């Protein structure tokens, strides 16, 4: 039997962070299953989903949490194995947003998605400088899970309206890995 863990790591960015984590996993016969890492400003932030023999879970948790210090935060959480058909009936779409950066963009879009029971599967955001003017531009790419029965045309129209209110461009398209 295997236990499933979610491990979150944040610390100042430097070489060797992933190696340090993987060394602990290998030492406890854990399997690295899924992860996301990013350099945000000068910090490293990562999240890993892993499985480990149940008899090794407590020792691995102790090893990982012992890595925490004044610069590195490590959080280990018990998780459930992924269910095969949790979101199988949902349609996957890609949402792209870009426009002048200002407060409240993510909140407004996230509030709308939540009100329609749309799950955000992945999301990446960044602020970049516009060519020529160097005006800060906010960009977002999200993969969303649209519930069955929610018309894509209506969703698209609503998101275009929200884009107008926020002064940003929003595009919605079928995710390349799914069929709408």
Image: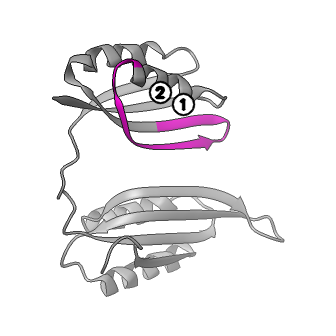
State the residue at coordinates (35%, 62%). 111
Residue 170 location in percent, x, y? 50, 76
**In the displayed structure, does residue 46 sit left or right of residue 117?**
right
Q: Residues within 10 Å of mark 2 (few under 14, many from 20)?
A: some
- Kindly state the secondary structure of the residue where label 2 is placed: helix
Task: Tell me the quadrant of the picture where the C terminus can be found.
Answer: bottom left
Report the residue marked by disc 1: 18
Q: Nearer the viewer, residue 123 or 31?
A: 31
State the residue at coordinates (19%, 54%). 84
**Which secondary structure class fits the magenta region best?**
strand
* Rendered image quadrant of residue 85: bottom left
Task: Tell me the quadrant of the picture where the N terminus can be found.
Answer: top left
Report the residue marked by disc 2: 22
Q: Is residue 155 above or below residue 89?
A: below
Q: Is residue 112 above or below residue 35?
A: below
- Kindly state the secondary structure of the residue where label 1 is placed: helix
Q: Which residues are magenta?
A: 27-46
Residue 158 location in percent, x, y? 37, 80
CB within 8 Å, label 1 to label 2? yes
Q: Which mark is residue 57?
A: none
Q: Nearer the viewer, residue 41 or 176?
A: 176
Residue 55 location in percent, x, y? 21, 17
Marks counted in the figure total 2
Residue 14 location in percent, x, y? 66, 29
**In the displayed structure, does residue 139 sit left or right of residue 158?**
right
Answer whether residue 41 is magenta in the image.
Answer: yes
């Amino acid at each position: 039997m295997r236990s499933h863990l979610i491990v979150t790591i944040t610390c100042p960015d430097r070489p060797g962070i992933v190696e340090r984590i993987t060394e602990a996993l290998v030492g406890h016969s854990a399997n690295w299953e899924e992860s996301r890492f990013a350099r945000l400003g000068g910090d490293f932030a990562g999240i890993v989903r892993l499985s480990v023999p149940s008899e090794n879970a407590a020792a691995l948790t102790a090893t990982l949490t012992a890595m925490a210090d004044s610069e590195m935060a490590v959080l280990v959480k018990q998780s459930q194995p992924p269910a095969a058909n949790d979101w199988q009936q949902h349609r996957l779409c890609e949402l792209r947003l870009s426009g002048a950066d200002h407060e409240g963009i993510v909140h407004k879009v996230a509030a709308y998605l939540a009100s329609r029971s749309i799950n955000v599967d992945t999301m990446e955001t960044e602020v970049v400088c516009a060519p020529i003017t160097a005006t800060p531009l906010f960009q977002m790419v999200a993969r969303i899970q649209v519930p069955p029965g929610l018309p894509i045309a209506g969703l698209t129209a609503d998101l275009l309206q929200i884009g107008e209110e926020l002064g940003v461009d929003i595009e919605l398209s079928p995710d390349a890995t799914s069929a709408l």
